[in-house]
Amino acid sequence: GPKKEPATVPLDARELARWRLGPKAGLDFAILTGDINPVHWIGPYARMAGFKACILHGYSTLARAIESMNINLWSGDASRLHTIDVRFTKPLVLPAEVGVYVTGNGNLSVGGAPGGAAYLTGEFTSRTT
């Protein structure tokens, strides 16, 4: 079929948070969760799997995005997030610096900058207080 355009952060997106992820961010998440897939924390294994270096767990990316939304959109009130539906669009190679971006119509992205590649895209709804 036709090749899909790569996912990007919308140009009108607002940055909520910025993360500096070190080369051991995958190992930290593996220790925290027990998800010990070596592609996330053993460099030679990640390279054998076709990556330049270790990649961050998708669920670590999602958890960090939700935490950033909770803190910066809803002042820490985690009950405000009603629904979220995301897609992991590109491996997040470590180390990296990325931002969490939202638009006014409920779009969420994790990527380097507006207009740039997105590692995660999705939509969310929130509850009113």
Image: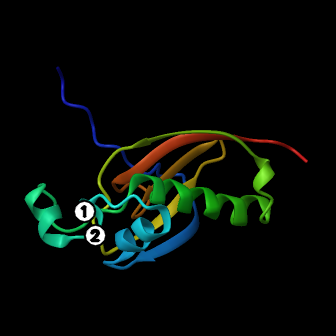
Q: Is residue 36 above or below residue 8?
A: below
Identify the coloring.
rainbow
Left or right of residue 89, residue 16 in this image: right
Tell me what residue is drawn at x 38 percent, y 58 percent: 57
- Which residue is more in the foreground, 35 or 48? 35
Q: Is residue 120 above or below residue 35?
A: above
Pick the quarter of the image with the N terminus. Answer: top left
Seen at 51% across and 54% down, the residue is 62
- Residues at discs 1 and 2 in contact (Cβ within 8 Å): yes
User: Identity of the amino acid at label 1?
Assistant: Pro
Label 2: which residue?
Answer: 41
Where is residue 77 shown, x and y percent of the image?
80, 59
Residue 3 location, quadrant: top left
The residue positioned 40% from the left and 66% from the top of the image is 30
Q: Which residue is mark 1?
A: 38
The residue positioned farthest toward the right in the image shown: 129
Locate residue 15, reporting x and y percent.
56, 64
Q: Find the residue positioned furthest to the left.
A: 48
